[in-house]
């Protein structure tokens, strides 16, 4: 599970991959940068795959992204990820990778709604109404 969180604790992006390797990390970073713009600094854990992916990404850039490997600065991500773990631990397990991807995307979306990231200033909706409007929209797309 790859997750990006800003300094304020808001979820920027997430991606579930079958393997935690350089290719998966590079795909996630490219997707996240394409959707959200290029960051000045990225704080990662001690994962070699993340470091290798960032170095490969920086190799083709004029102005490289600053890489900070520090487990204490990474604490914002870990604290945010705790709420997701709290939801998934009591589950009996996922039948397939597809089911895991779908369920974790829903849990992440509910967590973003609970943090107030999905609020629209013009419409005053409850969290349940926000989820139902998103889930009916997703049903139409699928």
Image (cartoon, helix red, strand yellow):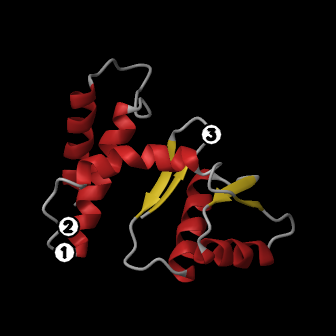
Q: Residues within 10 Å of mark 3 (few under 14, many from 20)?
A: few
Helix, strand or loop for disc 1: loop
Q: Residues within 10 Å of mark 1 (few under 14, many from 20)?
A: few
Q: CA distance from mark 2 to mark 1?
A: 5 Å
The residue depicted at 45 percent of the width and 57 percent of the height is 14
What residue does disc 3 label?
7
**Left or right: where does residue 33 sit relative to residue 124?**
right
The residue depicted at 41 percent of the width and 32 percent of the height is 115
What residue does disc 1 label?
96
Instruction: Please say whether residue 103 is visible from this viewpoint.
Output: yes
Mark 1 and mark 2 in contact (Cβ < 8 Å)?
yes
Residue 58, above or below 79: below
| Image mark for residue 99 | 2
Helix, strand or loop for disc 3: loop
Report x, y in % for residue 113.
35, 35
The residue depicted at 59 percent of the width and 77 percent of the height is 49
């Amino acid at each position: 599970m790859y997750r990006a969180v800003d300094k304020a604790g808001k979820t920027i992006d997430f991606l579930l991959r079958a393997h935690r390797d350089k290719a998966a990390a590079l795909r996630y970073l490219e997707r996240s940068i394409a959707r959200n713009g290029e960051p000045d600094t990225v704080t990662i854990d001690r994962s070699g795959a993340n470091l290798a992916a960032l170095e490969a990404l920086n190799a083709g850039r004029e102005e490289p992204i600053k890489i900070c490997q520090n487990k204490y600065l990474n604490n914002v991500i870990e604290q945010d990820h705790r709420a997701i773990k709290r939801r998934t631990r009591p589950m009996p397990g996922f039948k397939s990778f597809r089911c895991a991807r779908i369920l974790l995307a829903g849990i992440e979306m509910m967590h973003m709604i609970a943090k107030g990231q999905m609020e629209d200033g013009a419409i005053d909706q409850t969290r349940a109404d926000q989820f139902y409007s998103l889930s009916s929209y997703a049903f139409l797309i699928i």
